[in-house]
């Protein structure tokens, strides 16, 4: 039995797939090994559940007594049997530990040629800063290029998870954490926050785009400056709205999320939490970006107020955002 289980674990790793009943596509170098280890543990567990449950049912049917339920029964001590059911499962569990330890060391040892991307978690959006200074709300990487993410949080505990890559790591306030992976499949995937972080936790997602080799450099060249490429101030503001993750809390169609919708915001009279009325003009928008707690719209409590973007956006970015909000009617 033990030889059969070990042989199962030593089968060739599962080939990359488009996903199955249990898992999404295998889109990183880790996915095949992690899935194989999972299925080994799964089938070993299923085997022992069936064996133990089967023996339990068999003994119940064979040895129960209706005629004399109080009759005393005797049993003998069987040392070989007791050693067998202790040692053999122990060996299997030790082998599972070895599989898990190998996977853990792989996940925690990035190669020297890994490209580093800084990831900032903030209620309720992810921001990615690339080596050339580009800041974006999407993670763009290259197929077959190792990527290392350095994660941090500016408010509460978050957790960065890409199911297709089989990789996850917490973003912890006041410290840096790291994870790495090598994408093996081009396409678009989703990163999600898997640590409950407040009202809009379920919407804290980010698109992950895997380019063909060479595609990342081209994308970075285009995205390097939201104000460049012949964009008008309003177009640059729309770009910044997407890059800074504003869409996680503020819609453009009038629907309500954690924050007020931007549809028709500019020039509108807004009632504040303290009962006063404010006109949503340039000064109000600037103050709301740099000091969001100063004036909170009625219906949105202090808990849902966004954190400050002081130091994260420049004056020309704020001007571009104001120009964009003028157009959102």
Image (spheres, helix red, strand yellow):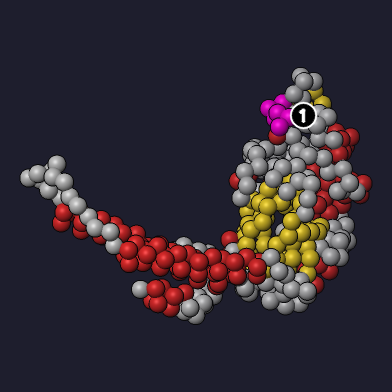
Q: Position of residue 90 (x, y in %)?
A: 45, 64
- Lateral position of residue 307 relative to residue 48, left or right: right
Looking at the rendering, the stretch of residues picked out in magenta corresponds to 298-303
Q: Residue at x 66, y 48 (%)?
A: 204
- Lateral position of residue 56 relative to residue 123, left or right: left
Q: Residue at x 76, y 71 (%)?
A: 114
> Which quarter of the rendering shows the N terminus?
bottom left
Q: Residue at x 37, y 64 (%)?
A: 83
Q: Looking at the picture, does residue 296 appear above or below residue 95?
A: above
Query: What is the total number of numbered labels drawn onto the structure image?
Result: 1
Q: Is residue 48 magenta?
A: no
Residue lying farthest right?
Answer: 315
Q: Is residue 301 magenta?
A: yes
Residue pointed to by mark 1: 296
- Lateral position of residue 59 relative to residue 229, left or right: left
Observer able to see residue 58? yes
Question: Which corner quadrant of the image does residue 286 belong to?
Answer: top right
Residue lying farthest top?
Answer: 275
Q: Looking at the picture, does residue 13 appear above or below residue 127?
A: below
Q: Which of 188 and 119 lies nearest the eye of the viewer?
A: 119
Q: Position of residue 34 (x, y in %)?
A: 55, 68
Question: Which corner quadrant of the image does residue 294 belong to?
Answer: top right
Q: Position of residue 301 (x, y in %)?
A: 70, 28
């Amino acid at each position: 039995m033990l030889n059969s289980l070990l042989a199962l674990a030593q089968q060739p790793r599962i080939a990359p797939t488009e996903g199955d009943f249990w898992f999404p596509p295998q889109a990183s170098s880790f996915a095949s090994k992690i899935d194989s280890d999972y299925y080994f543990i799964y089938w070993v567990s299923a085997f022992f559940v069936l064996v133990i449950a089967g023996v339990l049912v068999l003994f119940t049917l064979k040895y129960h007594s209706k005629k004399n339920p109080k009759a005393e029964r005797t049993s003998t001590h069987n040392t070989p049997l007791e050693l067998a059911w202790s040692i053999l499962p122990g060996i299997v569990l030790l082998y599972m530990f070895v599989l898990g330890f190998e996977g853990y060391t792989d996940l925690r040892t990035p190669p020297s040629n890994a490209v580093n991307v800084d990831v900032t978690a903030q209620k309720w959006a992810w921001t990615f800063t690339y080596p050339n200074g580009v800041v974006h709300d999407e993670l763009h990487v290259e197929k077959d290029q190792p990527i290392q993410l350095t994660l941090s949080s500016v408010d509460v505990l978050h957790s960065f998870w890409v199911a297709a890559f089989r990789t996850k790591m917490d973003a912890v306030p006041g410290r840096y954490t790291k994870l790495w992976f090598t994408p093996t499949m081009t396409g678009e995937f989703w990163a999600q926050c898997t640590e409950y972080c407040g009202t809009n936790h379920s919407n804290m997602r980010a698109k992950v785009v895997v380019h063909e080799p060479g595609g990342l450099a081209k994308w970075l060249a285009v995205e390097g400056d939201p104000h460049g490429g012949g964009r008008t101030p309003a177009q640059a503001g729309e770009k910044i709205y997407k890059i800074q993750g504003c869409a996680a809390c503020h819609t453009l169609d009038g629907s309500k999320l954690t924050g007020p919708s931007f549809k028709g915001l500019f020039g509108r009279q807004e009632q504040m939490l303290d009962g006063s009325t404010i006109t949503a003009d340039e000064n109000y928008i600037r103050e709301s970006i740099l000091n969001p707690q100063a004036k909170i719209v009625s219906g949105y409590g202090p808990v849902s107020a966004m954190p400050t973007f002081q130091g994260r956006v420049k004056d020309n970015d704020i001007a571009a955002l104001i120009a964009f909000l003028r157009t959102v009617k």
